[in-house]
């Protein structure tokens, strides 16, 4: 036991002497106190530019043009010619109503017009027949008036020359006055008959015009028994069946123009304000991305405080389905750096900048932050921002940049 303890003491003494001996060549010296406090960090060099954010929201695909087509006439549905889901051309007949009543109304309108035309023709002939004698009587009276006037004028000249007596001149004057009265009466009779005939003919012409209007209405009513597609599209839904009675204006089928689709979606007012009309967005459907262009915006938030927008889709997709809209917003223009480089103390936001081996605290103003990247102002040009930031880093600490 004593021998073992003695040997242990000798070994410890040898170790102590070896540590106190001269330093061997190549052996490093112990680090200084300053070097012991140096913190190894990485840095990034921020770049100036726009801070963009990509966002998505739900959308509904709807036809750009859709119409609830109504019946233009009352009647019983006779035939549905186009099945749901089938395309139709503009003006193509989709369903037919029973045309019997419309055909009867059309025939009655034709007869009414024919009768009005016959009445007008008869009245025109009667007028011409009644005016001819009166016209002849007026012409004869005017001739007699001219003869009597000439004789009376000649008689006045003869009376002044003493060739005829006063009694003969008075007789010539009386004949002149009588011829004048006869001409006036003939003229009045002709004018009275012309006025009466003109009024009667005008009334009959109005009756003909009214009958023509009724005929046009009856023809249109007959055409309305065939309900046609107002534009080319697809019959999305038929609401009636053969044998059912429909009223005027009652919807009978829904027509959709699938050549152009629109995506309807809603955004917060601040996002909607950053998307002007004509902005390009992406429509995500079935794992694919399709281009779309913003064409409408309400610009006024609804009851849910969201703004409704519409984009035209440049693809052939099934209408009525849900999709995703992806859009890009420019949040700010400034110096871009990782959001994790920002530190906050009270109301101050700052970053650590590597400068002459030290971590220097620099106050910045945040313009926008996406959570992963931020746009700030206040950084000097070419500054090297420490990122990631060690939890123990303080202003003025010695740092060593590593790759």
Image (cartoon, rainbow, N blue to C red):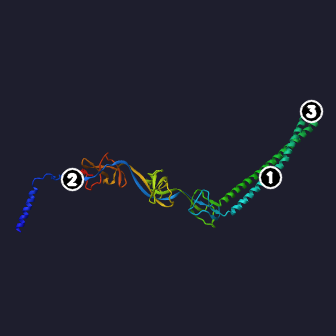
Q: Quadrant of residue 141?
A: top right
- Could you say where residue 78 lies in the image, as x and y percent from the top left? 64, 65
User: Gap in Å between the C-alphas at discs 3 and 2?
Assistant: 160 Å
- Could you say where residue 37 lies in the image, as x and y percent from the top left? 21, 53
- In this rendering, the label closer to the viewer, 2 or 1: 2
The residue that disc 1 covers is: 123
Q: Is residue 31 left or right of residue 175?
A: left
Q: Earlier in the sequence, mark 1 or mark 3?
A: 1
**SS category of the residue bearing label 1:** helix
**SS category of the residue bearing label 2:** helix
Quarter of the image with the N terminus in it: bottom left
Residue sitting farthest toward the front: 25
Residue 37 marker: 2
Q: Nearer the viewer, residue 339 or 167?
A: 339
Q: Is residue 305 visible?
A: no
Q: Dot 3: within a 10 Å radius of its alpha carbon, few (fewer than 14), some, or many (20 or more) residues? A: some
User: Gap in Å between the C-alphas at discs 2 and 1?
Assistant: 125 Å
The residue that disc 3 covers is: 158
Q: Dot 1: within a 10 Å radius of its alpha carbon, few (fewer than 14), some, or many (20 or more) residues? A: some
- Could you say where residue 175 lies in the image, as x and y percent from the top left? 90, 40
Residue 398 marker: none
Residue sitting farthest toward the left: 2
Marks 3 and 2 in Cβ contact (< 8 Å) = no
- Could you say where residue 376 lies in the image, as x and y percent from the top left? 35, 49
Residue 274 vertical placement versus 167 (above, below): below
Q: Earlier in the sequence, mark 3 or mark 2?
A: 2
């Amino acid at each position: 036991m004593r021998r073992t303890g003695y040997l242990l003491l000798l070994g410890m003494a040898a170790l102590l002497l070896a540590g106190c001996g001269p330093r061997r060549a190549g052996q490093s010296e112990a680090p200084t106190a300053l070097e012991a406090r140096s913190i190894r960090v990485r840095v990034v060099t921020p770049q100036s530019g726009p801070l963009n954010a990509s966002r998505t929201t739900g959308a509904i695909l709807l036809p750009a043009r859709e119409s609830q087509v109504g019946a233009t006439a009352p009647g019983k549905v006779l035939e549905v010619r186009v099945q749901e889901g089938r395309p139709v051309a503009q003006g193509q007949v989709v369903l037919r109503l029973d045309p019997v009543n419309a055909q009867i109304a059309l025939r009655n309108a034709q007869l009414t017009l024919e009768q009005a035309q016959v009445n007008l023709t008869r009245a025109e002939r009667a007028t011409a027949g009644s005016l001819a004698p009166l016209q002849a009587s007026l012409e004869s009276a005017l001739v007699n008036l001219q003869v009597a006037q000439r004789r009376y004028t000649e008689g006045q000249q003869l009376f002044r020359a003493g060739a005829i007596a006063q009694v003969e001149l008075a007789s010539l004057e009386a004949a002149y006055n009588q011829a004048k009265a006869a001409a006036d009466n003939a003229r009045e009779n002709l004018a009275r008959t012309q006025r009466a005939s003109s009024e009667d003919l005008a009334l009959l012409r109005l009756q003909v015009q009214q009958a023509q209007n009724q005929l046009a209405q009856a023809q249109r009513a007959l055409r309305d028994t065939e309900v046609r597609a107002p534009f080319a599209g697809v019959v999305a839904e038929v609401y009636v069946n053969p044998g059912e009675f429909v009223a005027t204006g009652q919807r009978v089928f829904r027509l959709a123009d699938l050549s152009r689709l629109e995506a309807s979606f809603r955004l917060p007012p601040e996002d909607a304000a950053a998307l002007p009309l004509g902005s390009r967005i992406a429509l995500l459907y079935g794992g694919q991305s399709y281009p779309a262009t913003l064409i409408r915006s309400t610009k006024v938030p609804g009851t849910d405080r969201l703004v409704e927008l519409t984009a035209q889709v440049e693809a052939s997709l099934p209408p009525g389905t849900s999709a995703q809209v992806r859009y890009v917003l420019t949040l700010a223009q400034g110096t871009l750096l990782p959001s994790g480089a920002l530190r906050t103390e009270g109301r101050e936001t700052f970053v650590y900048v590597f400068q002459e081996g030290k971590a220097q605290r620099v106050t910045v103003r945040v313009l926008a932050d996406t959570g992963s990247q931020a746009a700030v102002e206040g950084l000097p040009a070419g500054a090297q921002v420490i990122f990631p930031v060690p939890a123990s880093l303080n202003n003025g600490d010695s740092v060593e940049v590593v790759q």
